[in-house]
Image (cartoon, rainbow, N blue to C red):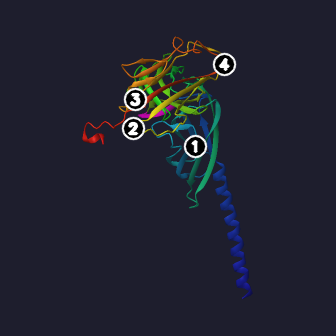
Amino acid sequence: MKASFIILGSILVIGLIGGGIFLLREGKSIAGLSIDFSVPDRVLAGEPFSLEVQVGNSSDHVLQNVVLTIELPAGMAFIGSPEEKIVTSKSLGDVGIGSLARETFQLIALASENMVKPVTASVTYRTASLQAEFEKHASRDIAVQGESILFDLSIPEKIFTGETFTAKLSYKNTGTIDLENLELKMDFPPSYTFTSATPAPDIGNTLWQIGNLRKGSEGAIEIKGSMVGPDNAFFEFKSELTSEFGGRSYTMGEKTGSILIQPSSLSVALTANGSSDMVAHPGDTITYAIRFSNDTDIGFKDVVARARLVGEMFDMSSVSSNASLRAVDNTLIWNAANTTGLQLLSPNEERTVTFTIKVKKQYLIKKLSDK
């Protein structure tokens, strides 16, 4: 019985020694794997470049089922793949002893500020000795310095509500290659009203198909429109410039701008019989008061106030006011010629103009729908 234990102990020791040697040999296999990168010293955002990854086997084992995986940082993409795809894998098969496998990837850095972006490579493989899978990682920083296209959005900082203004988009190819199938998209606030653009948009009021842009070439788009909003409200405008590589569009530039609705230089209030929410009835007499004030620190000369009467229930023959009446559109007009104090409205000064008019005694029923 004692002899049996001695024999089993000897076998176990031999097995552990053999396993240790085995593991040491596998450890040498891991140490013999190298990952090297070949990439330009610097790249331009928006211009494709090549990344070559070399996987070397300096061990004394054949590396089997070698798979190379590349992971990109945010703001970088594989040419021919969607912008959101940042991981891809390539099978390199078996890499023999002393062999070197190479794989080249076409990449593009998307619109961004100057920065250093790390690219990570992972290699997984097996050996004939063990069925376990081994893995090794390496990374390389890529310097993104400058942009291949200069892109800018220029809009006023402040406007009055309802004021027509111009937004200008400018672009210039400052890279080393010609750009193809450029498109420019605008994202307007909901309260923006598009008026016109030079050149005119190709799709709706928001997309311009610029086409090809040779290196050194430039262009601009001017867009006219207006905004309506409350005082001191901010509204954001967004623009995006894309170009096509490998059959897919990639972002070349993104710009945003904000506009402030500044308080009007004139404040205006309207009341009817002293109320802002009066309800009139047939036969009533209404006295309207229009109060306006200069809210700036400069005086306004030759102020003109207008009030247009809209609706069938006004008895236009009953109008009483020192304003002149433009009968073609039932508009009352106050100016320096008929109203004292409108020659000059000094800073922080207020004026009020009034008129009186009667409501017709009966509703006008001409057809069934008028009821």
Q: Is residue 305 left or right of residue 202?
A: right
Viewer-nearest of labels 3 and 2? 2
Instruction: Describe the element under mark 2 as helix, strand or loop.
Output: loop
Residue at 45%, 32% in the rendered image:
285
Question: Which callout, 4 or 3, points at the residue further toward the start of the chain?
Answer: 3
Q: Position of residue 287 (x, y in %)?
A: 50, 30
Dot label at residue 347: 4
Q: Which residues are magenta?
A: 246-251
The CA distance from mark 2 to mark 4 is: 41 Å
Q: Position of residue 171 (x, y in %)?
A: 51, 21
Question: Which callout, 1 or 4, points at the residue further toward the start of the chain?
Answer: 1
The CA distance from mark 4 to mark 3 is: 32 Å
Q: Residue furthest left?
A: 367
Q: In which quadrant will I find the N terminus?
A: bottom right
**Residue at the spot of label 3:** 310
Inspect the image, locate mark 2, and give the three-letter code of the amino acid beneath it.
Pro
Q: Residues within 10 Å of mark 3 (few under 14, many from 20)?
A: few
Q: Nearer the viewer, residue 345 or 9?
A: 345
Inspect the image, locate mark 4, and give the three-letter code of the amino acid beneath it.
Pro
Instruction: Describe the element under mark 1 as helix, strand or loop.
Output: strand
The CA distance from mark 2 to mark 1 is: 93 Å
Residue at 68%, 61% in the rendered image:
21
Question: Which callout, 2 or 1, points at the residue further toward the start of the chain?
Answer: 1
**Residue at the spot of label 2:** 282
The CA distance from mark 3 to mark 2 is: 16 Å
Most frequent secondary structure within the magenta stretch: strand
